[in-house]
Image (cartoon, grey):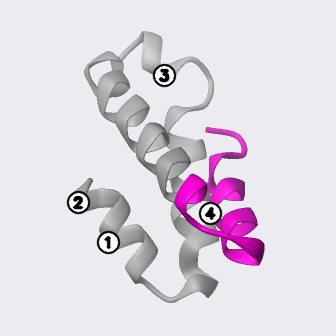
Amino acid sequence: HEFVDMWLSIDMTNWHNVRTALVNRYSGGSLHGDLTDEGPWLKFVKMNIRHRASKASGIDKLRISRLLIGL
């Protein structure tokens, strides 16, 4: 909750940087290796983003939904 709050509170031009950092961190099967403990946290983040997108409308809904690409 807090992570997504902070993410969405930063300047929108930096949203992509956060998404890219997460994609890079969790790509390549790392959730099945060293980062296994972070799996539930990432699921919660994705669920929270989906919820935020469902509450938004128009272009905001699309922008928030796009944060999930690659996660």
Dominant secondary structure of the residues highlighted in magenta in the image: helix
Give, as a three-letter code, the residue at label 2: Glu
Left-right relation of 17 to 43: right
- Segment colored magenta: 53-71
Q: Secondary structure at mark 4?
A: helix
Q: Residue furthest top?
A: 32
Q: Residue at x 56, y 80 (%)?
A: 14
Q: Secondary structure at mark 1?
A: helix
Q: Residues within 10 Å of mark 1 (few under 14, many from 20)?
A: few
Q: Secondary structure at mark 3?
A: helix
Left-right relation of 11 to 7: right
Tell which circle, 4 or 3, labels the residue nearer the N-terminal end: 3
Q: Nearer the viewer, mark 1 or mark 3?
A: 1
Disc 1 versus disc 4: distance between alpha carbons? 13 Å
Give, as a three-letter code, the residue at label 4: Ile
- What's the mark number on residue 2? 2
Residue 61, image quadrant: bottom right
Disc 4 versus disc 2: distance between alpha carbons? 16 Å
Residue bearing the label numbered 4: 64
Q: Are marks 4 and 3 in contact (CB under 8 Å)?
A: no
Query: Which x, y percent locates residue 42?
Result: 40, 35
Residue placed most toward the observer, 6 or 56: 56
Tell which circle, 4 or 2, labels the residue nearer the N-terminal end: 2
Query: Which x, y percent locates residue 19?
Result: 57, 57
Q: Are marks 1 and 3 in contact (CB under 8 Å)?
A: no
Left-right relation of 45 to 27: left
Residue placed most toward the observer, 33 or 66: 66
Tell which circle, 3 or 2, labels the residue nearer the N-terminal end: 2
Give, as a three-letter code, the residue at label 3: Ser
Query: Which x, y percent locates residue 56?
Result: 59, 67
